[in-house]
Each structure stands twice: as structure tokens, then as C-alpha cells.
Amino acid sequence: MDQTQAVTKKKMRQPIESGCPDGMQYMHPLMLKNFGNWKYHDRPRPGVLHHVAHSGDEIWTVRLGTQRQLGPYEINLLCDIIDKYGEGYVRFTIRSNMEVMVSKWEKVAPLIKAIEAAGYPVGGTGNSVTMISHTQGWLHCDIPGTDASGVVKALMDELHTEFVREEMPNRVHITTSCCQINCGGQGDIAINVQYTKPPKINHDLVANVCERPSVVARCPVAAIRPAIVNGKPSLEVDEKKCICCGACYPPCPPMQINDADHSKLAIWVGGKNSNARSKPMFHKLVAAGIPNNPPRWPEAAAIVKKILAVYKQDARDWERVGDWVERIGWPRFFELTGLPFTKFHIDNWRGARNSLNASTHIRF
Amino acid sequence: MSERPKPVDPERHSSYLPREKKSTKPFHQTPMLDQLVDGPWPSFVTGLKRLAHGNNMMVDVLGQLEHSYKTRLGYWKGGTVSVFGYGGGIIPRFSEVAAMFPESKEFHTLRVQPPAGNHYTTKMLRQLSNSWNKWGSGLIAFHGQTGNIMFIGSTSENTQHFFDEINEYGFDLGGAGPCVRTAMSCVGAARCEQSNCNEMKVHRTLVNNFIDDMHRPALPYKFKFKVSGCPNDCMNSIQRADFAVIGTWRDDIQVDQAEVKAYVGSHGRKYTIDNVVARCPTKALSLNDDDTLAIDNRNCVRCMHCINVMTKALSPGKDKGITLLIGGKRTLKIGDTMGTVIVPFMKLDTDEDYEKLREIAANVIDFWAENGLEHERCGEMIERIGLVNFLEGIGIDVDPHMISHPRTSSYVRMDEWDQEAEKWMQRKQPATA
């Protein structure tokens, strides 16, 4: 290296590869003290958990819903409340709810009052509709068909009363996803983008932007092949084979899959992560062709509310949405919700025959 | 939709907007986003507007977001940004409509690993927020779907400054790209009586052992660890993790019969039979005439239902450990796969036990790194090559707990049946001897 260069070159700081920090250092002292020695829990009211340790120690947790995207104002507002009415310790659930722990029952009511006075809902415990699991959407994603924060805000406004109460047969986990990759994950009800048209290709850009063999390999139905278009190396799509999944779009942005009118929403039900009662289940398609209609997505919200109303009315205690549909059967689900059953509900992907009724088990 | 009551103190409320505008750039009109300001749920739009009062970057982000709402299209493109010494951990975003919204032409996200179990003190939350307010937009997502704290919105230059600052006080980047990703673990032993392992220790043992594979993406595709302390699987690990660790137990459910009687007394016999006994998936429960519970523990599959319902009367057994499942993921490319059992039970008490867990994880990642195709998740590779080839690759013996039922197709060559049967008999011998 040239000596003058060596002198002027700014020394870069080496990262400390510390990895995942130890949670113990931020944990409520009662949780630290009784780590691994809890005896039971109950819920004195919606939004509050009460855990009792073998030592006799008790801890109360107040759960509140957030908008997930927090700025310094919200963080300081909530931290001020937690410092004044709580004990300075907080954790987040997987669904962006905050949990504030306190060591005395007497602290719970003033804490709830302060949280609610600041405009944050207390709930999301037990058999409630808890916060919708959340992706990035138009705010930050590079491939989104819709927004995430907006869909969640619009729906949670509608479902607010179900968040602060525990009146469902069992807990309800709703998820949203802005493309078919489904980052929002499995849900009792999932609202996911569903593309309905093959990608539109900008052939001028493909050769410079995309690694063509990996794009070809990415297609689940082998509908993409290399081609020379307008004298330039590009890719072409067999539109008869294309299932409009959008898998080619992330590795090759000139293959635009999103379309203002043709990116629709689909609703899926019955996903369940827990092993309780039945084994974990994937969610199943129940409605599609729903317009992607910002800022409040009223058509999608109406279907979600209809499904929730029927589930609340018809399911037995402790049945998750998926458990409930397994008991009553899919024909009854479509009858009760009034949703149309179409040829698109019948799977034709690998393993599809496992989803057909190979019996005479039929309800009349 | 219920309306929100008027705030008692409007200065201390999620709907608060500053009177003073410190950002120099005028606001864009946002008629669509404005419709997401009202309503009982706290509004992210109000949050973005608050930030836009303080910085020009957020003024233009709001403008671009409104543009997306109007045109129903996204306008962020990826690129390459990282911090010195690392290859991943940052999601670069460059605006495609920077001509209209120049202040947010660079709007990158840093993925940062939260403390295991997502525990924070208010002091640490404020510290993180202050650092991000200094170097970025101020906007933080708690948390992303993989489990990262997402620090949303900074320029290429400031990502390095922000990372340097938080790295000094103990935070490190997570994964992005084809690498080991940030892991997740439930609240577990810290506050849950249903915990069967030290979730935080498992979480940190696994992910911090593969920190090089996280920071320098060189694997076929993403690889996720998730840890749930019991089969309720609050971390969704079976469906979302390539490597799922789930706490379980192998002795009997602990029963407090006095509490069972109390439960029957308060909820009624019919309710108890319908909602506890009849909901057992393997019919292992029976309510005795004296309102105590009989449990056929040999046929209990540890589903958790009865323990979830009767939290005072029932709890997991004392001989605790974990089950390992491999290969969960969503649709892309071959369709959904659930994780499947590769280790039905292992203890996790001693350093040697943790070492064994680390070894299994290393064997899985090494075998997959060697044999996985580009952009092929571990579960997809197993689907392509078959579970038996995978097990032989990582040195784990077949076990009937790995299957729902034996094969139904006779189209298979079984030349070495006798040797394989002998292996099973050999393995079983010490247990029966």
C-alpha cells in the first residue's frame, strides 16, 4: 500500500460480534428470582396475567397493544408511564404487544388507567382477538402488493372491542402479508396478497439487473425460460403455465408482479401453531378476489368480521378456528359464512389428493 | 367502529401532534393516510407525522407512502449496504421516486437482535431510541416477523455510525440474506409455569454459536432457529423455523387433585368433561367418581390442552427436556412444510447436553450448506432427498417418533432389510437388558 494512503485512510472500527444479548440483565427482579420456578397463572381481568411462583412470589403483567412502529415520542410516553406506575421493566410479545410487569396487585389498576389515558388499549390476553401480526408493506418492503401497517390499523380499529375483551371461544391470531411469501405467517385468519396476473417484464433491464439462471430456477412451475427479446438477452414467461406467485420478482425486479388493479387480497382460515388438542395446522383458502382498497380495505374487513361473528356464535369453548371447522366440516363453514365455494378452493398442488374427502363422511 | 374518547391530557397521548414544526420541508398532502389517523387503535400515521415535524426525511417518507396508497404500488428497491466487517444485517432501501421525494432517497433498515425473550428496561428502550433518533429517522419496529428490532430509515453513511454506537453497548446486527437469521424464544422460564427448558440459554447457545454464518451470508438460503418452552409453541417454531426447539417432558403430568376437585366444583362436571376430558386427543383423561382426574400418561402426547385449561391443577412433569423438529417454512418454492421430529427427546441439563445440541445444529447446517441447492430451505432439501438420506448425513438413527405412519407404497427396494432390522435390535438391547 502507498504510504500516504495508509496514513490518510480512516481506521474503521471492528465490530464486536456479541450476537444475541442476554435477556437476564433487563428482566424484572421477580422473574429473575423465580426463573424456572413458577407454579401457576390466572387472568384476573382481560389484559392482565397473574403468575404465582413456588416461592409464593406473585407478579402481574399488563398487556397493551401498540402500533408496532414506535418513535421517540411514543417510546418516552410509554416508558414514563412504566417508570411511574410500573417498575421500569417491559417486554414485547411476538405480536408487538407490550407487557409491563409489576409486583403488586394494587399497582395494576392505576397502570391500566394511565395506559388507557395515553390512548393505548389494554387487552390481547386469553380468548381475545389479539394484535395482528405485522409486516412492512409499502412503508419499507421492496416487493409489497399492499400496505401492512394500514391494513392492521384499519382492522384493529374495527376489532378493538374484541382486543379488550375475552369473549371468543379461544384465542384468535390474525396475520397479514403483503405478498404470497406470507411473512405474516400462519393464522386463525390470514389476509394475504394474491396476484392474479403474470409479471410484466421490462426487457431492457433484465440482462443488467437479473442473474437469469437463478430466476429460471426460482419458478415453482418451470414457466420461465431465457430468451432474446428485441436483440437483448432477457427472460420470457409461459403465461399459460404461470401461477402468478411472484417468486421471480424479488430476484428480478424488472419482472414486475404488482399491479394496482390485479393484485388482490385472499383470506385464509384455520392456521394454528400450537400442538394443543390437534397437531399444528396450516391455514386454508376461503375467499379471494378481494380488492386491495386503501386506506381502510373495507371489503377485506367485512369478510374478516363475518368469519369472526360466525366463529364466535358457533364454536365451542376452546375450539380454535381450525378446530371448529374440523368439527363442523367445510360445507357448513361456507354455508354459515355465506362465502362462495369455487373450483379454486380444490387444491391441485403436490400432495393435493390428501386434501380430498376419501370417505363417505358427509354431513347433511 | 367505536370512536376514541377525547384525551384527558392531549400532550401525553398517542394522538398528540407537536405545535412547532422543526422540519424545513413543507408537508405533502396526505388525504388517504389521514383517514388512518382516527379510530380507537393507536395510529402509526400519527406517529409518522410526529416524526415529520422533526425531520425532512420523514416528510418525504409520508409523501411516498401516500403516493403508494394512491397508486397502489410500492416504490422501494434493494441494493447493497452493510457495516464494516459484516456482509449482512441491513436491508437497503433506495427510493424509485426519489425525484419526487428526495429527502428519503435512502431509507435503510438495520436488523438488530433483541435481548433473548424480548426483555427491556425502560432505560435501555430509551437509550436505543435516543441512538436511533440521532442517526436515523427515529422510527423503530418492535419487532419484525423474524424477531429483529427493526430500526427503519437511515442513510448509507449513518448506518455505520448507528451500528458503532449500539454495538458498544451490547447490541449486534441480525441476519439478512442467505444466512443464519435472528432467533426467537418465548418468555418461558422467566414467567411461565409451563416452561420445560431454559429457552434463553438454548436461544443464545444456538444463535451465538453461528454468529459468523449470520453476519457473512454464505448459506443456500435463510436458516431460522426458534425456541418454545412447551408444545403450545408460542414462537410458531414448527411452521416457521428450520430448526425448532420445543420444551417437553417424559414423566407424568403433575396433578394437584385438590385443585382438580376445586375446578370441577367451580366449573361443573359437564364443563370439565366436555372441555378437558373430551378434548384430550388421545383419550388419556378420565374424570373419577370423586371428581379427581385419572391420567393415562403413557398415551399422553403432551399437547398441553388440559394443562392450559386447568392451570392450577395440572402442570408439566419433572423430567424435562426438548424435542427437535427440522424443516418448517412457508410456501416458496415447493409449498408449505412443517418441521418434523428428528430428536423426540433429549435432556438439556449439563454443559455436555448443550454441547450435543450445538453439535446437532452444526451437523444440520453443514450438511445443508453442502447439499442444499441455491435458495432451497432445509425442509425443501429434505423433501427432495428424503428424510433417511438427511438422517444419515447428520448421523441420527431412524426412530418411529419421526413418522405419522409407516410407508403405504410398496415401491421401494429393501435389499438390506436384515442388517437394518439387526441395527434396530442392537439399539434396543441396552434398554431391555
Image (cartoon, helix red, strand yellow):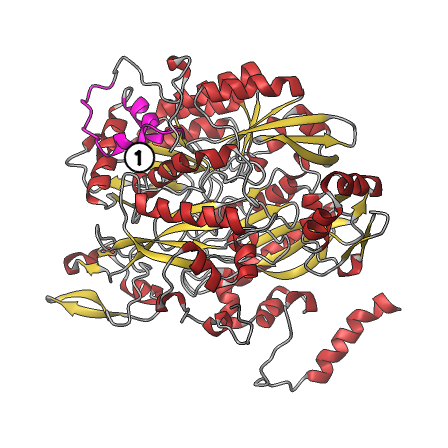
Residue A106 x, y percent position in the rendering? 65, 17
Front-most of A259 and B123? Answer: A259
Residue B109 x, y percent position in the rendering? 36, 37
Residue A110 x, y percent position in the rendering? 57, 16
Residue A145: tell me if it is visible.
Answer: yes
Front-most of A9 and A233? Answer: A233
Q: Quadrant of the N terminus of chain A?
A: top left
Q: Is residue A266 left or right of residue B244?
A: left
Front-most of A158 and B356? Answer: A158
Give the crowd class for mark 1: few <14, some 14-19, many >=20 residues within 10 Å: many
Q: Is residue B312 above or below residue B120?
A: below
Q: Is residue A58 left or right of residue B47?
A: right
Kindly identify the residue that appears in the image at 39 percent across and 65 percent down: A345
Residue B172: tell me if it is visible.
Answer: no
Magenta-span inclusion, residue A312: no
- Return the residue found at the far left: A230
Front-most of A305 and B216? Answer: A305
Amino acid at pointer 1: Ser
Kindly identify the residue that appears in the image at 33 percent across and 63 percent down: A214
Q: Is residue A339 left or right of residue A79?
A: left
User: In this figure, what is the number of numbered marks?
Assistant: 1
Magenta-span inclusion, residue B51: yes
Residue B295 x, y percent position in the rendering? 80, 54
Q: Which residues are magenta?
A: B23-52
Kindly identify the residue that appears in the image at 38 percent across and 13 percent down: B11
State the SS at label 1.
helix
The quadrant in which residue A219 appears is bottom left
